[in-house]
Image (tube, rainbow, N blue to C red):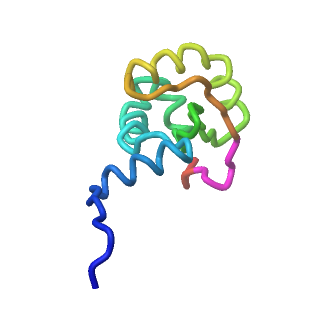
Amino acid sequence: MMGKERSVTSIAASVEVLRRQFGLGRPDSLEALTEQWAELAGEQVAARSRPADLRQGTLTVDAYDPATAEILNWSKQRLLEGARERCPRERITDITVRVRRADRPSGR
């Protein structure tokens, strides 16, 4: 059965279209921010927080306690500039901090 010819699109191109459509950050961008989080946020703050999501230009950071969340909020501009430097292909416009006590590492 011969129908209209369909152009073959690579899976990567299709994923890229969906990523942009839903406002998702590039997976390698979130990975890079996670790997460099201690350098970006500082060792002590990084031990009590982690980048969780990058969507529609907003980096969401999980903090394990309210004090860490407050420190991250005070440092928002510096963190935003650092995130932009580390992910120049990404349009990061804001950082949201949320307290996620359930995600707290054991032993802390």
48 in relation to 11, above or below? above
Q: Position of residue 10 (x, y in %)?
A: 27, 56
Left or right? Give the position of 70 relative to 40. Answer: right
Is the residue 79 above or below the residue 22 in the image? above
| Count of numbered labels shown in the rendering | 0
Q: In the image shown, does 47 or 63 lie closer to the viewer?
A: 63
Residue 98 covered by magenta stretch? no
Residue 36 occupies quadrant: top left
Q: Residue at x 54, y 20 (%)?
A: 80
Which residue corresponds to the image point at 67% horizontal and 55% vertical from the top-left?
Answer: 102
The foreground one among 71 and 107 is 71
x, y percentage for residue 57? Answer: 56, 31
Residue sitting farthest toward the bottom: 1
Would residue 15 be found to the left or right of residue 63 on screen? left
* Magenta segment: 99-104
36, above or below 81, in the image:
below
Lateral position of residue 61 relative to residue 11, left or right: right
> Which quarter of the rendered picture does the N terminus lie within?
bottom left
Please name whichever residue, 28 or 70, is drawn nearer the observer in this view of the structure: 28
Residue at 53% over, 20% down: 79
Give the residue drawn at x 66%, y 34%: 97
Residue nearest the observer in this picture, 21 or 24: 21
Q: Position of residue 70 (x, y in %)?
A: 71, 26
